[in-house]
């Protein structure tokens, strides 16, 4: 049984998609052991509590400097003994020591087709604002492994979403979530939990096609 720790900062709709998929049997061999948030007000923490999952607050504001936070966060994570760490709308940069401690065991969901509209400054609604500003016709979401770079690890899965006339950043954000994020993230977790993925030469390979 894959032990998952989910890290969140806000609404937690991706966390909810994962919890619902586990309840519905769409993700098998996996359980969410804990949810970590950097923000006390995150609705995601309430979602965790509603599911009787421990919610842990780890805010950088409570530490003297970033290095102290990085050490404490990594120690907290190690204590939870996760097989997989899922960043589901987590706005804090993952400490380098955590990446080293959990190689190929951290995944992230990003609301664009990487390598477009990603990296420093591309988070939340800003991604969709930039997409509309640039006038691209297709966007989407990406699930990828996390390395020490920003949105740079091996890509697990991507799904395209078309821009529509009269889109606003808010409308587009919602559609990318519904059509791509909430589908891709549970699928990726199920694939990992059931040993269907491997990383070969820095690229993700699916061992067998999904049925
Ligand atoms: C999602 O768009 C996710 O891709 C991005 O932040 C947003 C989080 O939404 N990284 P939620 O907290 O899962 O509702």
Image: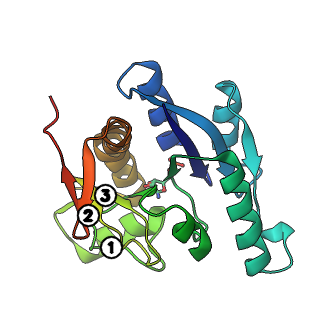
Residue 109, position as x, y percentages in the image = 41, 55
Q: Is residue 138 visible?
A: yes
Do tag 1 and tag 2 residues touch (Cβ < 8 Å)? yes
Q: Position of residue 6 (x, y in %)?
A: 57, 46
Question: Is ligand 1 less than 8 Å from the beta carbon at label 1?
Answer: no
Question: For numbered disc 3, what is the local secondary structure?
Answer: strand
Residue 162 seen in the figure: no
92 with respect to 157 (left or right): right
Look at 59% across and 67% down and name the residue there. Answer: 98
Identify the residue at horizontal 42%, vertical 28% (top origin): 29
Disc 1: CA contacts within 10 A as few (<14), some (14-19) or many (>=20): many
Residue 113's tag is 2
Q: Count residues near mark 3 (Cα–Cα under 10 Å), then give few for <14, some for 14-19, many for 20+.
A: many
- Residue 113, relative to residue 97: is it above or below? above
For the residues labelled 1 and 3, say whether their Cβ atoms are less than 8 Å apart.
no
The one nearer the camera, 32 or 93, is 32
Residue identified by numbered label 3: 142
Q: Which mark is residue 185?
A: none
- Asked whether, in this view, residue 186 is left or right of residue 77, the answer is left
Name the residue furthest top: 24
Pointer 2 and pointer 3: residues touching (CB < 8 Å)?
yes
Residue at 17% from the left image edge and 45% from the top image edge: 207
Q: The residue tagged with tag 2: helix, strand or loop?
A: loop
- Say above or below: 52 vs 159: above
Tag count:
3
Disc 2 under 8 Å from ligand 1? The reply is no
Q: Nearer the viewer, residue 35 or 196?
A: 196
Q: Nearer the viewer, residue 175 or 110?
A: 110
C-alpha distance separating marks 2 and 3: 6 Å
Q: From the viewer's perspective, is 55 left or right of 115?
A: right
Residue 117 image label: 1
Query: How far apart are the two marked residues, 1 and 2, measured between alpha carbons?
Result: 7 Å
């Amino acid at each position: 049984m894959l032990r998952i720790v989910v890290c969140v900062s806000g609404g937690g709709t991706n966390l909810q998609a994962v919890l619902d998929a586990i309840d519905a049997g769409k993700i098998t061999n996996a359980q969410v052991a804990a949810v970590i948030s950097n923000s006390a007000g995150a609705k995601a923490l309430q979602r965790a509590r509603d599911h009787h999952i421990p919610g842990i607050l780890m805010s950088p504001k409570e530490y003297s400097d970033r290095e102290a936070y990085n050490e404490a966060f990594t120690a907290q994570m190690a204590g939870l003994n996760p097989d997989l760490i899922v960043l589901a709308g987590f706005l804090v940069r993952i400490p380098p020591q955590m990446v080293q401690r959990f190689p190929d065991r951290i995944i992230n969901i990003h609301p664009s087709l990487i390598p477009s509209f990603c990296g420093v400054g591309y988070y939340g609604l800003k991604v969709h604002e930039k997409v509309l500003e640039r006038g691209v016709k297709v966007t989407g979401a990406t699930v990828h492994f996390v390395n020490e770079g920003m949105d740079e690890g091996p890509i697990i899965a991507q799904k395209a979403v078309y821009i529509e006339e009269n889109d606003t950043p808010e409308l587009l954000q919602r559609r990318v979530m519904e059509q791509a994020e909430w589908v891709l993230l549970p699928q990726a977790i199920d694939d990992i939990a059931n040993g269907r993925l491997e990383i070969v030469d820095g690229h993700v390979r699916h061992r067998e096609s999904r049925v």
